[in-house]
């Protein structure tokens, strides 16, 4: 099978490509514009493989998309290219509208034309897999929140949710209504709607996945986990938004890559699969865990926890995300292999071993300054 992966030089896309080249016999074409978030260095371990090819292309450029599809003749497309940082979407939504909405529309149209000219058997087996986020669902009730809330969530699944806290709270299922809060999540929600409309109207065989927060190697240092690791090592403040009690459901990026490959190979066209790690953590717990692992691996006199600094909260900040991943588990047999404890330890160790990568990807463009506070 030949897979065209858009956004393959990014955090998750590069994990997907490393997984496919290292563990399967499939071929990959990586189509990426190489924005500040795209780094071909994340693919060094697979880029000399003859089953890998790279095309530097913007998904908004229809002529170039037509050329790449005609030239490489992929059997499936995994669409990850996007602007992905909520804080940047608050400072400047235009790029998010352009890439996430117009870019997805342009890719859908190029794909539709390509798909309609395929032979009957290839046409039937073709897949367009759209990779999206759980942030399209908005936020869920938080254990500290006693208000009833205005939305009707699916009934809580007893024993799940933040079980560690002895409560049973709702989770996002594939039926949860969309209610995005940020320009980023609204642009991703729009792209999800476009993808489903191209299935319903034109019959394009699409798959949609909505995943929780990822963490792991090669994550651009604007996101919470790499930012905290790198600031801590430099003795800089560790910014925690508001009280740090926002809850995210963390998934190790290599578990996500395995899930995405399973969906594109075995998923049923027209279906949506939620992907999550069953690892609900408050942001402050995540920061504490990183500080404690660093203390063990790079001991210093004063605990790294002393660097924690509460800063103004993100405008419109969602309080809690949590995924019910039982559908993909039941139907496709996928389950995460890493717990948060094993995955975060691997991640901290990876950053300690790859500080030169971190330095190079930040060069010139970004110095870990606060983004998205000015709404
Ligand atoms: P990322 O920002 O690390 O990478 C995005 C990649 O897309 C980069 O390589 C960038 O160069 C490329 N790109 C951006 N605009 C482009 C354009 N116009 N044309 C071609 N390429 C372009 O993002 P990520 O964290 O790897 O996320 C990948 C996908 O997964 C996104 O669609 C995101 O919404 C989704 N997702 C991310 C998470 C997460 O926790 N990071 C969770 C769920 C879903």
Image (tube, rainbow, N blue to C red):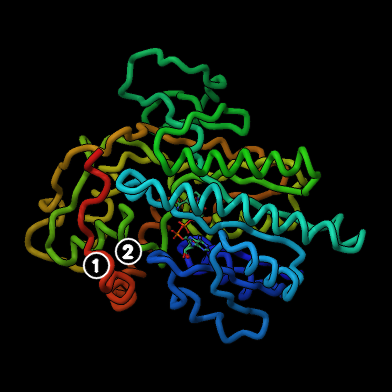
Q: Which mark is in front, 2 or 1?
A: 2
Q: CA distance from mark 2 to mark 1?
A: 9 Å
Residue 138 position within the rendered picture, expressed as x and y whole percent measured from the top left: 45, 31
In the picture, the disc for residue 116 is none
Which residue is depicted at the point 75% across and 71% down?
Answer: 70
Residue found at the very far front of the displayed protein:
63
Q: Label 2's element?
A: helix
- State whether residue 263 appears in this view: no
Q: Is residue 79 left or right of residue 37?
A: right
Q: Nearer the viewer, residue 158 or 263?
A: 263
Residue 326 position within the rendered picture, expressed as x and y whole percent measured from the top left: 62, 38
Q: Quadrant of residue 244?
A: top left
Which residue is depicted at the point 30% across and 23% down?
Answer: 144
Residue found at the very far right of the displayed protein:
120
For the image, the number of numbered tags is 2
Seen in the picture, residue 117 relative to 189 is either above or below; the reply is below
Q: Label 1's element?
A: helix
Q: Circle 2: is it few (<14), some (14-19), or many (20+) Cα within 10 Å?
A: many
Residue of label 1: 297
Residues under numbered marks 2 and 1 in contact, where contact means CB atoms less than 8 Å apart: yes
Query: What is the quadrant of the C terminus in the image?
Result: top left
Residue of label 2: 348
Q: Nearer the viewer, residue 349 or 218?
A: 218
Which residue is depicted at the point 19% across and 49% down?
Answer: 239
Query: What is the quadrant of the N terminus in the image?
Result: bottom right
Q: Is residue 103 left or right of residue 28?
A: left
Q: Is residue 273 left or right of residue 296?
A: right
Point out the tag, 2 or 1, that comes first from the N-terminus.
1
Which residue is depicted at the point 50% across and 33% down?
Answer: 137
Q: Nearer the viewer, residue 372 or 338?
A: 372
Q: Nearer the viewer, residue 365 or 97?
A: 97
- State whether residue 111 appears in this view: yes
């Amino acid at each position: 099978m030949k897979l065209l992966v858009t956004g393959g030089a990014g955090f998750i896309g590069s994990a997907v490509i490393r997984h496919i080249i290292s563990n399967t016999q499939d071929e990959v074409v990586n189509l990426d514009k190489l924005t500040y978030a795209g780094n071909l260095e994340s693919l060094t371990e697979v880029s000399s493989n003859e089953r890998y090819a790279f095309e530097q292309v913007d998904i908004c450029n229809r002529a170039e998309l037509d050329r790449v599809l005609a030239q490489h003749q992929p059997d499936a497309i995994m669409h990850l290219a996007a602007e992905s940082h909520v804080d940047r979407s608050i400072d400047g939504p235009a790029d998010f509208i352009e890439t996430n909405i117009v870019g997805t529309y342009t890719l859908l149209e190029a794909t539709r034309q390509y798909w309609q000219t395929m032979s009957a058997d290839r046409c039937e087996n073709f897949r367009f897999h759209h990779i999206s986020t759980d942030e399209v669902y908005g936020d869920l009730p938080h254990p500290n929140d006693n208000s009833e809330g205005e939305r009707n969530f699916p009934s809580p699944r007893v024993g799940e949710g933040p079980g560690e806290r002895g409560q049973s709270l709702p989770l996002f299922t594939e039926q949860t209504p969309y209610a995005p809060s940020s320009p980023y999540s609204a642009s991703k929600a729009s792209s999800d709607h476009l993808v489903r409309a191209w299935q319903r109207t034109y019959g394009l065989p699409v798959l949609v996945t909505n995943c929780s927060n990822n963490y792991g190697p090669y994550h651009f240092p604007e996101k919470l986990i790499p930012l905290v690791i790198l600031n801590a090592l430099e003795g800089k403040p560790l910014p925690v938004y508001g009280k740090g009690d926002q809850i995210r459901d963390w998934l190790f990026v290599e578990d996500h890559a395995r899930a995405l490959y399973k969906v594109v190979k075995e998923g049923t066209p027209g279906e949506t699969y939620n992907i999550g790690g069953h690892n609900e953590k408050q942001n402050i717990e995540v920061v504490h865990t990183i500080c404690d692992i660093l203390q063990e691996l790079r001991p210093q006199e004063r605990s790294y926890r002393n660097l924690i600094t509460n800063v103004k909260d993100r405008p419109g900040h969602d309080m809690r995300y949590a995924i019910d991943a039982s559908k993909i588990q039941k139907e496709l047999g996928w389950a995460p292999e890493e717990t948060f404890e094993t995955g975060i330890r691997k991640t901290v160790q990876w950053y300690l071993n790859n500080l030169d990568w971190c330095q190079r990807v930040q060069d010139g463009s970004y110095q870990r300054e606060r983004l998205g506070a000015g709404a």
